[in-house]
Amino acid sequence: MDSMKSVGWQPTCSHFRVMPRCLLQFALLTILSTALFAGQDSVPLTAEAVLTKLAAMESARNKRLPSYKVIREYHLELESRGKSVISTAEIEYRQHNGKTYRILNEEGADGLFRRALHKVMQAEVKAVQSESEVEVGPKNYSATILGKEIKDGRECYLLSIVPKRNSKFLLKGKAWIDIGEFGLVRMEGYPTESLSFWVGKPYIVQTFENVGGHFLMRSNKSLVEAKIVGHLELTISSKNYTLKPGEPVQRTAELSKFEKSK
């Protein structure tokens, strides 16, 4: 600077015009590089991380799930004897009181078959009381990511899932998890414990749909090779979900946290 002063150097207007232009170019290049290479260094989610996010999102969604009603059709078919029974019921869920059911109509075989369907409905009502025991999350399952797949129009993580303990209610098989909303879209496999001496371990396929931001059961199909009576199929189909607004529920911090991290 002393040498510049000695020759009488003074900053001119042109210097101040050049510097902001250079800074602007650097800023534009920074923005461009960020846009072009965003996500290049991001670490892919592990299977455990996917399960953790799924469990957290489901927990948050359940906390703000209002009461609802749904019509369910229960269809039990015994192929070898040409018998079937269909029961139609209204299932009502209340946030703090669980589920109840009311049979609307029954047709087909009676006696033992109808009583079997009634037991299925009763089991569904009781299952709400032990949701943590059947939760698809790291508490109950270990998993491996098999890849990504479109299922029912949704881009999903496809996981191979293995229960951490033997249970009638935990499936060893596959699960499809919505990538954008971390909701369970489909699940299929065998329970790790026999349901009974007669039916053993049926192959179960469950599908879910997004109803007002909540992933609720759309269908459940169980294929059984039963002792003595042979091939059995139980299909449960849901229709006409009606969400009933109750007390306004604040968005939970847990839900907001995971929505921001998606």
Image (cartoon, rainbow, N blue to C red):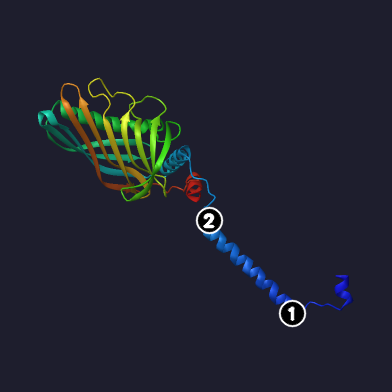
Identify the residue shown where x is 19% and y is 22%. Answer: 227
Q: CA distance from mark 1 to mark 2?
A: 38 Å
Q: Which residue is mark 2?
A: 38
Q: Amino acid at mark 2?
A: Ala
Q: How many labels were placed on the picture? A: 2
Counting from the top left corner in percent of width and height, residue 235 is at: 22, 37
> Which of these two is toward me, 194 or 244?
194
Side of 20 where 244 appears, left or right: left
Q: Amino acid at mark 1?
A: Cys
Q: Secondary structure at mark 2?
A: loop
Identify the residue shown where x is 26% and y is 22%. Answer: 196
Q: Which residue is mark 1?
A: 13
> Which of these two is toward me, 156 or 68?
156
Residue 10 visible in the shown view: yes
**249 relative to 1, above or below:** above
Side of 137 where 91 appears, left or right: left
Counting from the top left corner in percent of width and height, residue 23 is at: 66, 68
> In the rendered structure, which disc, 1 or 2, sits on the residue that comes first in sequence?
1
> Which of these two is toward me, 134 or 129?
134
